[in-house]
Image (cartoon, rainbow, N blue to C red):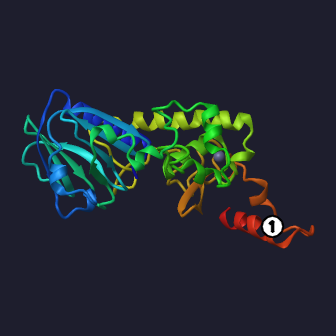
Amino acid sequence: MPELPEVEFARRSLVKWTDGRRIVRTEADPKARTFRNSRVPDVEALTGRLVRAERRGKFLMLTFDDGRGAVAHLGMTGKFVKRSPGTETKWSRARFVLDSGEVIHFQDPRLFGLIEPVPATELTTHESVAKLGVDPLVDGLTVEQLREALAGSKQELKVALMDQERIAGLGNIHAAEALFRAKVHPSRKPDTLSPAELTALTKAIHEGISFALEVEDGEEIEYVEEPGAKNPFLVYGRAGEPCSRCRTPIEQMPQGGRTTFFCPKCQKAPEKARAAPTKRPAPKARSKTPAARGRKRA
Ligand SMILES: [Zn+2]
C-alpha cells in the first residue's frame, strides 16, 4: 500500500512527466468511485500546465495554471503510470493526455484512490490535508518534533506512528521498518521511550524513507503486495525469515487491525506484554485489561 515514499515517487513522476508539457485532455471513468462526490466534468476540466505538485503525508496536491487544483490519494493500490498513445492500460480510472500524445493513467485496481478537484488556493486547507501531522520529508521531523507528535498518546507505538494526525505518511510498512531499525518494540507506549530511543526512532524513520526512495527509484513503481513483486524491506512481510541482524525468526502479530512484523530479540517487548500472570493482588480491572491485551498481542 502506498505510503510516504511511494506517494513521493508519484509526485516526482508527475513533475518529471509534465515538465514542459501541457495536459490537453483529461478523461475520467464515470463509473469509478475515484472521484467520490466530484462531478466527472470537474475532473475533466483539469487541463493545462501542472504548475505545482506537492505532497503532505499520503496526499498529493496538484495545481494547474488556470487556478484549478486537485487533492489526490493513491488509496490501497493506486499509481500513476505513463504510456504511449493507444496503449491499453488495465484499471485506468483517469487519464491525463499530454501534448506529446503520451498518457498519464491513474491506475487503481481496488478503487480506494481519490482525485478530487479543489481550487488551488484551497488545497492546503482541504479537510483531509489540514488535519495531517508533521511530514518527515516536508517538515524535516526532528527528535523534538517526534516527541511532540507522540505526546499524550495512549496508543501502542506502532499505532501512534501510523496516526496521520500525529505523523503524516507512515503506514503499516514504514512504521514497522522504522521500529525495527530503531530496535524498539511496536507495542511500547510512546511515553516510555528514553531520549536515546526517541533519537534512534527519529533517525530510523528518515533512514527507512530514504531507503525506500532509493530502491523504488525507476520508471515505474511496483508495490510489495503486487504478485511477483520483490520485497526490499527489512522486516515487513518477513515472518518466519531470519532477522537480518540476529538471525532470530521474524514474528508477526495483529495490532490495530493490521499485521505487525518485528524481531522478538532485537525489539524487546515492554514489561506489560512480557509479564506472566502475577500472584500479587492488584485491582481487578487494571490487572485484566492492559496485561491481558498485551499478552494476546505479543
Ligand atoms: Zn533480530
Figure disc tally: 1
Observer able to see residue 55: yes
Counting from the top left corner in percent of width and height, residue 214 is at 41, 33
Mark 1 within 8 Å of ligand 1, using the beta carbon: no
Residue at left offset 24%, top offset 52%: 107
Residue 97, placed above or below residue 142: below
Residue at left offset 57%, top offset 42%: 178
Observer able to see residue 216: no
Counting from the top left corner in percent of width and height, residue 263 is at 63, 50
Q: Is residue 273 left or right of residue 125?
A: right
Q: Quadrant of the C terminus?
A: bottom right
Q: Please state which of residues 280 and 180 is positioned toward the viewer in this rendering.
A: 280
Counting from the top left corner in percent of width and height, residue 206 is at 53, 34
Residue type, numbered disc 1: Arg
Q: Give the class, few, some or many, for how many residues have Cα within 10 Å of label 1's Cα (few <14, many ≥20).
A: few
Counting from the top left corner in percent of width and height, residue 286 is at 81, 67
Residue at left offset 27%, top offset 51%: 115
Outermost residue toward the bottom in this view: 284
Q: Please state which of residues 33 and 227 is positioned toward the viewer in this rendering.
A: 33
* Disc 1: which residue: 286
Outermost residue toward the right in this view: 280
Residue at left offset 59%, top offset 32%: 203
Tell me where residue 120 sits by quadrant. Answer: top left
Tell me where residue 294 sits by quadrant. Answer: bottom right
Residue 163, placed above or below residue 298: above
Q: Please state which of residues 40 and 90 is positioned toward the viewer in this rendering.
A: 40
Tag 1's secondary structure?
Answer: helix
